[in-house]
Image (tube, rainbow, N blue to C red):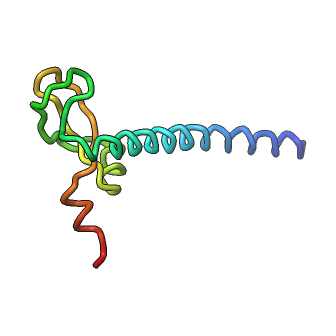
């Protein structure tokens, strides 16, 4: 009976940790993509258009990415949504 309880705890722990690990990996990928875009002008990755605008933050993922300086953008041509670091915010956070 004791082994059954330990197995149940292990299964429940894995059920909780797997989605958390997937979410953390997703956030890391999005931050790396945003860092690559930082040095370039705001251009859509999907269609190459320079007609992009800031997008509204929606959901928990945007809040987490926003805390690291990533801002959502949306392409006006194809409606593709992506994140990039804001240069002004990054400069303000550097202590002098």
| Vertical position of residue 84 compared to residue 74: above or below | below
Q: Nearer the viewer, residue 11 or 80?
A: 80
Question: Who is closer to the viewer here, 71 or 9?
Answer: 71
Above/below status of 90 relative to 11: below
Which residue is at a point 51% across and 40% down the rendered structure image?
A: 25
Q: Residue most toward the front?
A: 39
In the image, residue 93 above or below residue 96: above
Residue drawn at x 18%, y 41% is 41
Tell me the quarter of the image containing the N terminus.
Answer: top right
**x, y (%) of residue 70?**
29, 49
The residue under the point 36% across, 51% down is 64
User: Is residue 26 toward the left or the right of residue 80 in the image?
Assistant: right
Name the side, left or right, on which 93 lies relative to 50: right
The C terminus appears in which quarter of the rendering? bottom left
Query: Residue 56, percent across and down?
Result: 17, 42
The residue that appears at 60% across and 38% down in the rendered structure is 18
Quarter occupied by residue 78 = top left
Q: Is residue 35 toward the left or the right of residue 53 in the image?
A: right
Give the image location of residue 12, x and y in percent.
68, 41
Q: How many labels does the image show?
A: 0
Q: Identify the residue at the far bottom of this view.
A: 96
Position in image of residue 88 (x %, y %):
18, 59
Task: Return the residue nearer the eye: 31 or 21.
Answer: 31
């Amino acid at each position: 009976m004791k082994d059954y309880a330990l197995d149940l705890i292990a299964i429940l722990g894995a059920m909780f940790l797997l989605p958390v690990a997937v979410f953390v990996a997703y956030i890391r990928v999005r931050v790396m993509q945003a860092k690559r875009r930082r040095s370039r002008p705001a251009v859509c990755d999907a269609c190459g258009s320079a007609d992009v605008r800031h997008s509204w933050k929606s959901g928990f993922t945007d809040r987490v990415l926003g805390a690291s300086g990533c801002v959502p953008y949306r392409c006006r041509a194809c409606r593709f949504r992506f994140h990039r670091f804001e240069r002004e915010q990054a400069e303000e956070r550097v202590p002098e």
